[in-house]
Amino acid sequence: MTLRCITVDDEPFSLAKINGFIARVPYLTLVASFSSAIEVLPYVKQHPVELLFLDIQMENLTGIELLEILDPKPEVILTTAHDQYALKGYELNVSDYLLKPYSFERFLKATEKVLGRLAPAPAERCMDEFIFLKTEYKLEKVRFDEILYVESRGDYIYVVTPRVKVLTLMSLKGMAEKLPLDSFVRVHKSYIVAVDKIDAIEHGRVHIRGSAIPIGDMYREKLWQRLSL
């Protein structure tokens, strides 16, 4: 899912900073950037967007005043150096409130919240062909059809593919909820494997590309059912 974004800030440095942050996030696309809130109104009437990054204190028309007349509204993340507007922002149902100066990590957390709000419900969603996994320094795009297996390591998981092994902060249960149900099966409390990547099963282990993955007793029957054995 890609979110089309516009940014509005009358401070050139702040505008350049947030535009740079957007460029680092694969699921965000910057389509327009403005130094005045007044410029937003005619633009959004012709160009629908999913996300608006909006400064508050601007000349002629403030960010709050823009929100009061903007209809329909996209998801909105307010960006401001003044915390006294937080209550008013939430009364206007903004998605988040970034207090300047904010870090990239805080920015990313706000955008992930918007992504979660806009994503279809799990029972109704059309499964994407890939997932973005957050690592220490970047977001790594991984296609579901290249995943060999997923291994739990405490609060983290390893997502293993032939080309990369990605360590990300996520539970195995959380990852299971994102994977295509018909392509993966849990074989152990610490492992999920791709069914079509299994090379062999022997001595209570699943073999995939040279890795021997244990089969837990409580998952054995479900694995047999998936393999129609």
Image (cartoon, grey):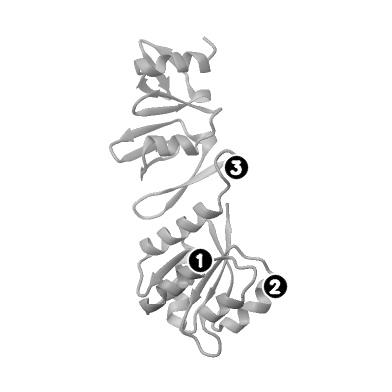
Q: Residues within 10 Å of mark 1 (few under 14, many from 20)?
A: some
Left or right, 86 with respect to 19, comes to left
- Circle 3 packing at 10 Å, graded few (<14), some (14-19), many (20+), is few
- Residue 209: percent from the left, percent from the top? 43, 25
Tell which circle, 2 or 1, labels the residue nearer the N-terminal end: 2
The residue tagged with tag 3: helix, strand or loop? loop
The mark found on residue 29 in the picture is none
Instruction: Name the residue: 54% across, 83% down.
Output: 35
In the image, 36 versus 16, the foreground residue is 36
CA distance separating discs 3 and 1: 24 Å
Which image quadrant for residue 73?
Answer: bottom right
Residue furthest left as drawn? 154
User: Circles 3 and 1: CB distance less than 8 Å?
Assistant: no
Residue under the image location 49 percent in, 39 percent down: 178
State whether residue 82 is above or below residue 139.
below
Report which residue position mark 3 lands on.
Answer: 125
214 to 143, vertically: above or below: above
Residue drawn at x 48%, y 13% as measured from the top left = 224
Quarter of the image for residue 37 reads bottom right
Of the numbered discs in the image, which one, if any, rests on residue 45?
2
| x, y percent for residue 76 | 52, 67
How far apart are the alpha carbons under marks 3 and 2?
28 Å
Residue 168 vertical position relative to residue 65 in the rendered view, above or below? above
Q: Position of residue 138 (x, y in %)?
A: 40, 54
* Discs 2/1, front: 1
For badge 1, the amino acid type reads Asn
Q: Position of residue 191 (x, y in %)?
A: 38, 28
Residue that mark 1 sits on: 93
Disc 3 residue type (three-letter)? Arg
Residue placed most toward the observer, 213 or 182: 182
* SS at badge 1: loop
